[in-house]
Image: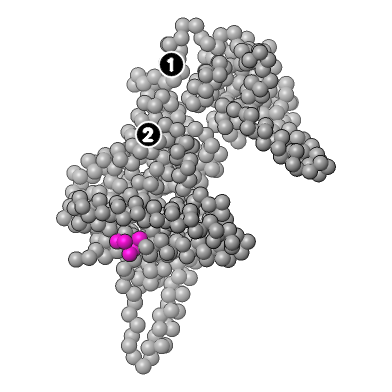
Amino acid sequence: MEPQSVREVPTATVPVSQHGESSLVAEHADLLSSVGLCVSVAAVLAFIANRLHQPLLLAYLLAGVLIGPQIGLKLIEDQQSIQTVSEIGLILLLFMIGLEMDLKKLLVAGKPVIVTGVLQFVLCAALGIVFFAPFGFKMSGGDFGLLYLAVCCAISSTMIVVKLLYDKQELDTLPGRITLGVLVFQDIWAIIVLGIQPNLLDPQFETLVASLVKGTLLVAVSLLVSKALLPQLFRSVAKLPELMLIGSLAWCFAVSAGADAAGLSREMGALVAGVSISTFPYNMDVVAKVVSIRDFFVTLFFVALGMQIPMPTADVIEIALVASAFLVASRFVVVFPILRWLGLGHRTSLLPAINLAQMSEFAMVIAAIGVGYQHIDQKTVSILIFVFAITSVASTYLIGYSHPLQQTLGGWLRKLGLRDLDETEGEAQSAPAHAGKDVVVLGFFIEASAMIHEYELAAVDGRHPLLDRVLVIDFNPQVHGELRRRGVACLYGDISHMETLHHADIHGAALVVSTIPDTMLKGTDNTRLLKHARRLCPRARVIVTANGAGAALAMYEAGADYVFVPRLHSASQMAGIVALALQEGFDRVRDDHIAELRRRDEVLQ
């Protein structure tokens, strides 16, 4: 028997009578009113969720529950028409995920991202199979609940993580970059899952190999066409927004149809279509135009998914709670040991584990497709939806308070005998490398990186004498390796802790510098660092950083010797560049700038 896919939803039957045309009109009116009701209820709940700082996807699921026939008010009895429309949202969602994947970055992501990205999904899924097996879930005989639970619990939410890290301004930190890299690898694993799904009911080795071969060919052909033909086509319509949009959607649905014809899922085809044009120079323009349409249909997808949730039993709630606890625990059991083994220290190893502790919206897509293929029953889908809801809400608080949580967990790890990088360094060196350093840089981010490189460029006879006086205190292990290679002393530590600065023995410092603005500092701010510096090294001059003039004046009143305001300093330089360019043209200004950029080799590029 041919497996039924999620797209093969029976459509509503039009009554055959002399009033057939009237019935058809009434059916369309019912569809429009159903869509309007879905969007209206979803919008109201989304506003409430936004005020409560909860993921909007939860509001859409709740809207489906409230108006659906299973639990709620039964305002919509016929779900089939909504599900058919919502499948467009599913395809567009995967198309957008593909568009936003940057495979080139994976090639230069570094060992921590590559090793963790490859191993995390496999190990978490394997743990899931072992964990859920005693609960009676199966992985054979047409029932694949065990496999779906394990796979879905191994994937984290890109949408939730990116939003929360963006709000905290942590996307460009080392833990943030590792988190985003692992999420991209999870998307690649999800592509493999989508390729295998259609043939899961016939899991012969030859069938699975044939499925993977078809998937590989689909990717190869799509990349070939996108490289040979699409650039010229998109370039010709780049100035016509409506044609850019139509052309992008046409490519998406064409590759989806090709995947369907090859026996793969349409959803996988949409993902491949996005990936194949993700490197186009017009990529961001396509994303900007498709995103609004996607958001509308994705809303309907999650509302339709919420309609399918039956009245939860105590058994379903119990398993969902246990599964949620397992998901969070599995991230610490898998991600933390891998990153610590790679020498990244407690903080950088714990934060990605905290960031990834939720279920992905991609898991909901996989589950919805699994129902269509009759791989899982409605009970399993309900469990997964509740796990998604529970972990999404929990993740809001886990990521929001990730730094205090990391510090608490780090303390427990120390008590268990797991040494952090600062303890290893302290035991390994009888004579501290930072002894006698009297210029202390608190935290090392892009401004400090540029400052250190300025001294390197201005070096006389191979080395600037000031570099031999500098001590950097930071908790980025990769920064430490590069600074040591350049002969700059550094200590591993969190500058937000007074104990770290006291342990660093900076009492005799002549100058203390903080170049990181308050928006990027975690657990402290420049005013507090100023007070700590005054207390620990009273003879030192102190430079701190402010975001604006008002904050800078407040820091001067607090006793700062100098306040660095990045936007004011850059504005002065930019004003000079604009005046020069208007007077002489941009050729020399641009050429000089390109030559300067090529000459730079900073610690943080």
Residue 334's x, y, as percent?
33, 34
From the viewer's perspective, is residue 469 above or below residue 27? above
Residue at 40% x, 43% y: name it: 185
Q: Is residue 222 visible?
A: yes
Q: Which residue is mark 2?
A: 115
Query: Which residue is farthest top?
Result: 430
Residue at 44% x, 47% y: name it: 158
Residue at 28% x, 51% y: name it: 148
- Say which of 345 and 329 sits in front: 345
| Figure quadrant of residue 169 | top right
From the viewer's perspective, is residue 2 above or below residue 334? below
Numbered range of the magenta stretch: 259-263
Q: What is the distance, in whole Å, between disc 2 and disc 1 at their CAs?
A: 25 Å
136 relative to 572 in the view: left or right: left
Disc 1 marks a residue whose amino acid type is: Glu
Quadrant where the N terminus sits is bottom left
Q: Earlier in the sequence, mark 2 or mark 1?
A: 2
Main secondary structure along the magenta-highlighted residues? helix
Q: Which residue is mark 1?
A: 423
At label 1, counting other C-alpha atoms closer than 10 Å, the crowd grade (few under 14, some 14-19, many 20 or more) is few
From the viewer's perspective, is residue 369 above or below residue 14? above
Which element is circle 2 on?
helix
